[in-house]
C-alpha cells in the first residue's frame, strides 16, 4: 500500500491563507475601532470634532518665537504669549502639550492652594501635595473630588519621578502613572520657555513635582526655578490629562474666549453665586449642597477682627470671631434661612493636612480651612480655621502668602457658608453674570 505524501507547498499555502485572513480580520476590527474612536458622530450622524485637532488647527505650528511647537510626536506650547486657555470644571487651565495619542496635558492657570510639599524624608509618592491632589486614602483627593465628571474626561496623567540635582543635566525615565492629577515637572517648565520667557510664570511661587535631593524639591520662584525645603509653603498648580476623545465644544483658546468643555455641567467649583447683593464663589461641591466663600470681605473690607483669646473657633464665646460670624453677621443676612448647619473642620495642621479632620465644630458660618480649594487669589490678609500649635492660627498675610498668625492680630474676614444645590433661575456662573438661585 502506497504511503500518502504530504505536499509541504500546499500546507504552507493553506497556513499562509489562514494567517492573511486572520490579519485582515484583526486589523480590520482595529481600523474600525480607531476610526470610530477618533471620528465619533452625534445623534444626527454628524462627525464630532476632536478638541486636540481643533487646537492644532487654530494654533499655528512654529519653530521660532511664541506658539505651538512640533517636538517629535508631541505638540508643545512655548513662550509667554500663547492662546492656550481652556475652561473645565469651573477652573481656567493652560494647555501644556498635545501627546502623541491625542490626549492633552493641562495645568491650572493659578495656584489652587498653598502648603507644604511634604515632610522630611518624603518623596513625591508619599508627599502631602500628592495626597491633596489624589484620593489615596481617607480625607485625601480634595482637588480630584471636586472635578466635574473626571472619569468621562480624564485619563491617568504621567508624573516624572526622577530626582534632578542640577538644571544643566536632566532627563526623565521614571514615571508615576497611577494618578489622575499631578504637578508640572522641571522638564515641563524648561520645555515651555522661549528666550527665558514662559506662560507658566504667573508672578507667584508654586511647587513642581520634581525633587532636588533629600528633603528639597524644586519650585517656580516667580520667574525662575529654585529649590526649597519640602516643609516650606508654596502654591499648588494641579495638572491633568484630557482623553484623546474629548470633543471640541466652543472657544478659540484666548483668555476671553477659552476652549470650554462640559460647560453645561451646572454648579461647579469656581462658579459665582449671588445671594441678595452679596457675591459668593463655589469652592466645594457635594451631592446635595455646595460650600461657598464670600468673594470679598465682611463689611467690604472696611472692618478687621481678631480671631479671639484662643485659636479655638467657638460660636458660643462672646468676643470671638466665631461668635460674631454666627450671631451678628448671620442675623444680618436677608438669606440666612438658606444657610445650612454644617461641620467645619478645625484640627491642627501638623505636617499632615488630614489632621485637621480630627476636630470639628457645628456652625452656620465658618471660614476656609487649610485643605480647601482657594479660587480667588486676589483676596489677602484673612484668617483660616486651621490651628497651628497652641496659640496660632493659619491665614494669609498682606502679600497673599499663607503663614502662621497670632490670634490677636486684626485681619479681614472672608466667611464661608453651606447652601443646598437649589435650582438655577438665571446667570452663567461668571463673576459678571453670576448664578441666581431659586429661594
Image: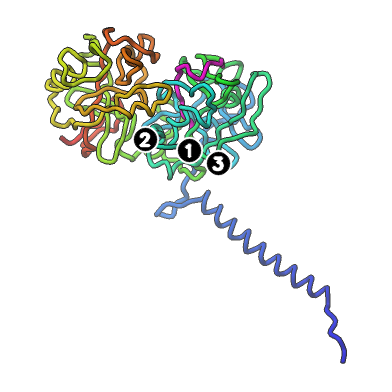
Lower sequence index among marks 2 and 3: 3
Report crowding for label 3: few under 14, some 14 to 19, many 20 or more residues within 10 A (C-alpha): many
- Give coordinates of residue 243: x percent, y percent: 49, 42
Query: What SS does tag 2 mark?
Result: loop
Report crowding for label 1: few under 14, some 14 to 19, many 20 or more residues within 10 A (C-alpha): many
* Front residue (pair 143, 317): 317
Q: Which residue is mark 3?
A: 102
Q: Which residue is the extreme one toward the bottom?
A: 1
Q: Nearer the viewer, mark 2 or mark 3?
A: 2
Q: Which residue is mark 2?
A: 146
Q: Which residue is the extreme one toward the front?
A: 390
Lower sequence index among marks 1 and 3: 3
Instruction: Kindly report the distance in space between the C-alpha atoms of the residues bearing marks 2 and 3.
Output: 25 Å
Quadrant containing the C terminus is: top left
> Marks 2 and 1: in contact by CB < 8 Å?
no
In the displayed structure, 265 sits above or below 112; it is: below
**Is residue 301 in sight in this rendering?**
no
Q: Residue at x 57, y 26 (%)?
A: 188
Q: Residue at x 64, y 26 (%)?
A: 63
Q: Which residue is mark 1?
A: 180
> Marks 3 and 1: in contact by CB < 8 Å?
no
Span shown in magenta: 225-239
**In the picture provided, is 20 more to the left or to the right than 286?**
right
Quadrant containing the N terminus is: bottom right
* Front residue (pair 352, 271): 352
Amino acid at each position: 500500500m502506497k504511503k500518502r505524501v504530504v505536499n509541504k507547498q500546499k500546507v504552507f499555502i493553506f497556513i499562509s491563507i489562514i494567517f492573511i485572513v486572520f490579519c485582515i480580520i484583526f486589523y480590520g476590527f482595529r481600523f474600525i475601532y480607531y476610526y470610530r474612536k477618533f471620528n465619533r458622530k452625534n445623534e444626527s450622524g454628524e462627525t464630532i470634532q476632536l478638541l486636540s485637532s481643533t487646537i492644532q488647527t487654530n494654533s499655528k505650528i512654529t519653530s521660532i518665537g511664541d506658539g505651538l511647537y512640533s517636538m517629535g510626536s508631541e505638540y508643545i506650547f512655548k513662550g509667554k504669549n500663547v492662546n492656550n486657555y481652556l475652561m473645565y470644571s469651573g477652573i481656567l487651565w493652560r494647555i501644556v502639550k498635545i501627546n502623541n495619542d491625542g490626549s492633552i496635558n493641562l495645568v491650572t492657570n493659578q495656584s489652587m492652594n498653598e502648603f507644604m510639599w511634604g515632610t522630611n524624608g518624603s518623596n513625591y509618592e508619599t508627599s502631602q501635595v500628592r495626597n491633596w491632589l489624589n484620593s489615596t486614602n481617607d480625607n485625601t483627593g480634595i482637588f480630584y473630588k471636586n472635578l466635574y465628571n473626571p472619569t468621562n474626561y480624564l485619563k491617568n496623567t504621567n508624573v516624572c519621578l526622577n530626582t534632578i540635582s542640577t538644571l544643566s543635566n536632566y532627563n526623565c525615565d521614571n514615571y508615576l502613572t497611577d494618578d489622575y492629577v499631578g504637578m508640572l515637572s522641571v522638564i515641563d517648565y524648561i520645555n515651555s520657555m522661549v528666550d527665558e520667557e514662559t506662560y507658566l510664570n504667573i508672578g507667584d511661587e508654586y511647587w513642581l513635582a520634581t525633587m532636588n535631593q533629600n528633603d528639597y524639591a524644586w519650585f517656580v520662584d516667580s520667574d525662575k526655578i529654585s529649590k526649597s525645603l519640602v516643609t516650606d509653603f508654596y502654591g499648588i498648580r494641579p495638572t491633568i490629562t484630557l482623553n484623546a476623545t474629548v470633543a471640541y465644544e466652543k472657544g478659540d483658546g484666548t483668555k476671553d474666549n477659552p476652549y470650554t468643555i462640559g460647560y453645561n455641567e451646572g454648579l461647579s467649583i469656581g462658579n459665582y453665586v449671588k445671594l441678595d447683593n452679596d457675591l459668593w464663589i463655589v469652592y466645594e461641591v457635594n451631592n446635595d449642597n455646595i460650600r461657598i466663600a464670600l468673594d470679598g470681605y465682611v463689611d467690604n473690607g472696611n472692618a478687621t477682627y481678631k480671631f479671639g483669646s484662643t485659636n479655638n473657633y467657638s460660636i458660643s464665646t462672646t468676643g470671638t470671631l466665631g461668635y460674631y460670624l454666627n450671631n451678628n453677621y448671620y442675623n444680618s443676612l436677608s438669606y440666612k434661612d438658606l444657610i445650612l448647619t454644617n461641620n467645619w473642620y478645625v484640627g491642627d495642621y501638623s505636617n499632615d493636612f488630614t489632621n485637621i479632620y480630627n476636630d470639628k465644630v457645628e456652625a452656620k458660618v465658618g471660614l476656609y480651612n487649610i485643605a480647601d480649594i482657594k479660587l480667588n487669589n486676589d483676596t489677602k490678609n484673612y484668617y483660616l480655621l486651621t490651628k497651628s500649635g497652641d496659640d496660632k492660627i493659619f491665614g494669609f498675610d498682606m502679600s497673599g502668602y499663607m503663614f502662621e498668625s497670632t490670634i490677636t492680630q486684626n485681619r479681614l474676614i472672608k466667611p464661608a457658608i453651606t447652601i443646598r444645590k437649589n435650582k438655577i433661575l438665571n446667570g452663567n456662573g461668571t463673576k459678571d453674570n453670576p448664578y441666581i438661585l431659586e429661594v
